Image (cartoon, rainbow, N blue to C red):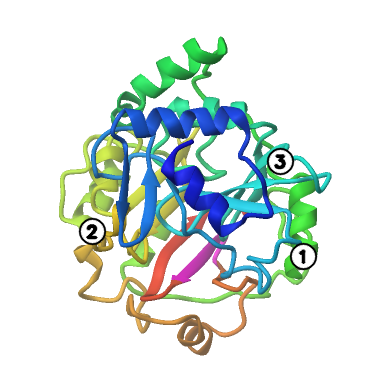
Amino acid sequence: MSTLEDAILARRPDWGPLPAELGEALDWMQERGHAIRSGGVEYATPYPGPAQQGVVFRSDLTLGGWLEDGSDPAVPLLPIADADGAGGILALWRRDGLVADAVVLINDLDAIIVADSALDLLRLIAIGHDELRGAVLGEEPPAESAAAHAAFRAWVQDRFAVDVPEAWDVDSGDEFTSWWQERTGQASPPPRGITENADADAGRVTVSGPVTVLLGILGAADGPEPAAAVGALLGIDAGPALKSGTRRTKKRGLEARVEKGTVTTIFVHIGLAAEGLFGTAPIEYPWWQGPDLIDGLPHTSTMADALALLGDPERTGKHHARYRVGEAFMNISFGPGGISQITLMTEVP
């Protein structure tokens, strides 16, 4: 048994052994030298090196940010991995209260089943995404992170005689979504593209500042003009289009999702985590440490600051507030140091 599995089960002795396939994978990571102990925390990754290029299994994760009783043995969830470096968590879920028969993804925008078994989780991870979020699961991963997972992908295929697809199918809402919303007191999710508030003016705000550049790109056709506008904002050459320049912009903290040639979502990362991989310093993006991206809302702003400036949101959670801006949606997520991410969307999940 790996030291990480020992540490996870020591924290939740009520849980019992991890699924066999997951335990084997953690053993493989340890044997390959992809596991480390730092600051009293056990870490393991399915790829080499200290840089985060995908999920990070770790022993100290809790659900305390969402559930007051997140460490209670009665809660049928066991957090096992950092999904995206921005607070997202992968957890085992006991649907029947006895056997961990599903793996769920929890973040400020998602509460969904991503795998029906531990083996399916390994297949998903082996695809090689540099982060797991509902918005990217159906896409092919970046070439760099896919290459970093090559050895793990080959091991999963050989050891379990399964295929690893190029992308992953997942529903935007499922039985876990309903269970989670009932447990956390959140309202049921709307169908994609429709908000749960029938009032078209609920949470509608007008903003100014550099964010308006990004809002102007949202919904536009991808190409040289959006790439040039983002490049000017970030102070880089973003290439001929946002989709092809993802690797360049991501290093500066911005990602654009392009669907059928149209820019549908823009993620602005302020700091990837309260702490970096293996307990190192957090990753921050200095291009937004100067002027406010949203006038009057510096990166150190709390959720209370945002509500005071912008008013009541269209939707809110414990760590995020979502507003309407024109025909778009703007979701602001908060972490220990202030704003952690801003997501601009043409449609809500």
* Quadrant in which residue 186 is drawn: bottom right
* Quadrant in which residue 17 is drawn: top right
Query: Mark 1 or mark 2: which is in front?
Result: 1
Is 12 in the magenta? Answer: no
Q: Badge 3: few (under 14), some or many (20 or more) residues near its Cα, within 10 Å?
A: many
**Residue 86 x/y as whole percent:** 42, 57
| Disc on the earlier residue, 1 or 2 | 1
| Disc on the earlier residue, 2 or 3 | 3
Q: Which mark is residue 183?
A: 1
Tell me the CA gap for discs 1 and 2. Answer: 41 Å
Q: Is residue 101 above or below residue 333?
A: above
Tell me the CA gap for discs 2 and 3. Answer: 45 Å
Residue type, numbered disc 2: Leu
Residue occupying image coordinates x 23% and y 58%: 233
Q: Is residue 306 above or below residue 46?
A: below
Query: Mark 2 or mark 3: which is in front?
Result: 3
Residue position for label 3: 100
Residue position for label 2: 233
Tell me the CA gap for discs 3 and 1. Answer: 18 Å
Residue type, numbered disc 1: Arg
User: From where the camera sits, is residue 166 visible?
Assistant: yes
SS at badge 3: loop
| Boundaries of the magenta span | 325-334
Query: Mark 3 or mark 1: which is in front?
Result: 3
Residue occupying image coordinates x 69% and y 48%: 192
Q: Is residue 306 above or below residue 339?
A: below
User: From where the camera sits, is residue 141 visible?
Assistant: no
* Quadrant in which residue 115 is drawn: top right
Residue type, numbered disc 3: Ala
